[in-house]
Amino acid sequence: MNRYLTNNWVNKSLLLATAIATVLSFTQCTPKQTATVSSVPNTTPQADQSKGLKDYFKDDFYMGVAVSSRSIRTDSALIIKEFNSVTAENDMKVGVIHPAENRYNWKNADDIVAFAERHHIHIRGHNLLWHKQGADWMFVGPDGKPASKELVLQRLRDHIHTVVGRYKGKMYVWDVVNEAIDDSQDPNVMYRENSPWWTTFKSPEFIEAAFRYAHEADPNAKLYYNEFNSERPVKREKIFALLKKLKADHVPIDGVGFQAHWTIGRPDADQIRKALDEVISLGLDVQFTELDMTVHENPVEVVPGKTPVDPGFTPDVEAKQIARYKMVFDIFRQYKKHIKAVTFWNVSDRGSWLDSRGGGSAGDPIPNPPVFIKAYPLLFDINNQRKKAYWAVVNN
Ligand code: XIL
């Protein structure tokens, strides 16, 4: 037996059989194996360091970033090198730009527009109607009581005409209405009802009106409806119903912004594709308007009085983030015909809006009292350097 086993020929046969079995096992699950192998992210930095995101994606879509009047100074080199589209993170929101009926704060918004024009960067307008960072004065009548629908409509029209009119021809797109759909899992509640807009109108009339006013003010700007958690099945169907209604009513809407405040664990590829397919089926374009990907799949548990345990940017979450960034950009490229821009929400992990919300994503509960936990959600690290995830998305 021993002699038999040590026989060279038998050993070779065994090796051959093992090799055949291995090949067969690969062949049997070809689709899965192929998908896994080809989706291993290549994070090798490219040799040509002069290129930025906008260059790597020049045949696909604009690459954008949310900026403030501060970040266009502190991070200007990175912004100019990497991006060819900007969104004002806060400076064009109603409460900021139009804090009182007869007062506008143009300074910050003007600075952002001037910066973008100086560097040939496209500008997205954000936003004209939202239930947050709005202007309370719009909803108060002359007698101090809730303003009538007619008065609110007139103020909305004035606001939109003034702001859109000021930047007419300078914005390639406006987020006209932001987050008007209910975020709950209840399919029977379609619109966000805890909003002064809903309280005033109790119908989607204000949504349609906002689009019509924006179109009057700048007929060439593309007009978008912008929303978060847009890939979650229940909400996706509510958004789809709203879009169908807007189309049926001939409301001038051109596209849908998927905010894309995601995590390293969600949403999955099928959910993103399904949501894209629905929007596209209506003849609408898409932009990913506020992309980030927190490393906290579940919000960090916050116990009052105790410092929360934050494991930080570990190799494990880094690997998940790299894989997921590659996955979503693979989808973006597949759908590039319908995608005009992909915009990140903030410049680098040095400062994300999520950090001051306990590191959770949009829609996650915000710890109260507030807790600072870093989210590490972007393609540039805390030193503004390119992360491995950056190379995973540009190496196609
Ligand atoms: C956020 C800003 O990033 C924060 O600085 C601000 O405190 C709150 O708003 N959806 C949107 C964005 O449409 O305007 C929000 O921006 C993030 C969620």
Image: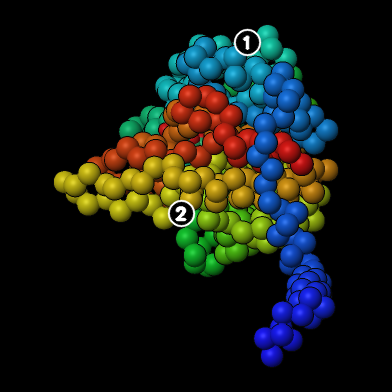
Kindly identify which residue carries mark 2.
297
Identify which residue, 314 or 374, lies in the foreground: 314
Residue drawn 60% across the image and 14% down it? 77
Question: For the residue marked with disc 1, what is the amino acid?
Answer: Ala
- The image shows residue 139 at horizontal and vertical percentages of 42, 36
Q: Are marks 2 and 1 in contact (CB under 8 Å)?
A: no
- The image shows residue 340 at horizontal and vertical percentages of 75, 36
Image quadrant in which you'd find residue 79: top right
Q: Is residue 126 left or right of residue 32?
A: left
Which image quarter holds the N terminus?
Answer: bottom right
How crowded pointer 2 is (Cα within 10 Å; few <14, some 14-19, many 20+) is rated as some
Tally the marks.
2
Q: Is residue 74 left or right of residue 325?
A: left
Look at the image and tell me whether residue 279 can be seen.
Answer: no
Residue drawn 39% across the image and 33% down it? 136
SS category of the residue bearing label 1 = helix
Kindly identify which residue carries mark 1.
114
Residue drawn 53% across the image and 67% down it? 188
> Which of pointers 2 and 1 indicates the residue nearer the eye?
2
Q: CA distance from mark 2 to mark 1?
A: 38 Å
Q: Is residue 123 above or below residue 318?
A: above
Q: Is residue 221 left or right of residue 71?
A: right
Which image quarter holds the C terminus?
Answer: top right
SS category of the residue bearing label 2 = loop
- The image shows residue 25 at horizontal and vertical percentages of 76, 75
Question: For the residue marked with disc 2, what is the amino acid?
Answer: Glu
